[in-house]
Image (spheres, grey):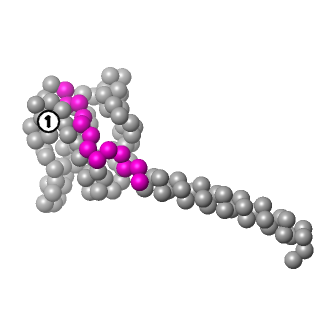
Amino acid sequence: MDAFKMRSIKPLSLTFLFFALILGSGSAVGAENRGAKEILLNGGTSGPVPFPHQRHQDIIGDCMICQDLFPQQSGAIDELKSQEKLAKKQVMNQSCTRCHRAKKAAGEAKYGPIACSQCHRK
């Protein structure tokens, strides 16, 4: 192989290697960053709601089912409620209990709590 071909292949190979490392490390970080194992949500006057975050990730599998509604950051639900972008009980009624009731109706053995007092802790 002549010197010209070697000089043009080397930068191309290095570029490919660089992008492979960047993309590979990004997916490894994404796989490890599952957020908190459990999150304590503000449940208003009914008391806080301990939310088993990683258990839901394992069962649901698709984070965007919930994360489409609110961003992945601490206090996001309270912030969206204060901006009136989420109604007071929207997350619980339209996401949580709706999913739990659907699983129960489908005959699944593990469907999650469906009554307010089963989640809220005073």
- Asked where in the image residue 58 lies, by quadrant, the reply is bottom left
Task: Give me the residue at 32% from left, 44% from top.
Answer: 36
- In the displayed structure, does residue 31 sit left or right of residue 45? right
- CA neighbours of label 1 inside 10 A, class few (<14), some (14 to 19), many (20+): some
Q: Could one spot residue 93 in this view of the protein?
A: no
Viewport quadrant of the C terminus: top left
Determine if the magenta segment contains residue 41: yes
In the rendering, at what x and y percent does residue 101 appear?
16, 49
Task: Give me the residue at 35% from left, 26% from top.
Answer: 79
Q: Residue tagged by mark 1?
A: 120
Determine if the magenta segment contains residue 24: no
Viewport quadrant of the N terminus: bottom right
In the rendering, at what x and y percent does residue 75 appear?
33, 31
In the rendering, at what x and y percent does residue 116 appear?
12, 37
- Give the overall secondary structure of the magenta segment: loop
Q: SS of the residue at dot 1?
A: loop
- Vertical comparison of 3 with 69: above or below: below
Task: Give me the residue at 19% from left, 26% from top.
Answer: 44
Which residues, given as a range, are shown in magenta?
Answer: 32-44
- Vertical comparison of 29 with 81: above or below: below
In the rendering, at what x and y percent does residue 40 appear?
24, 36
Residue sitting nearer the eye, 11 or 81: 11
- Asked where in the image residue 86 lies, by quadrant, the reply is top left
Q: Callout 1, which amino acid? A: His
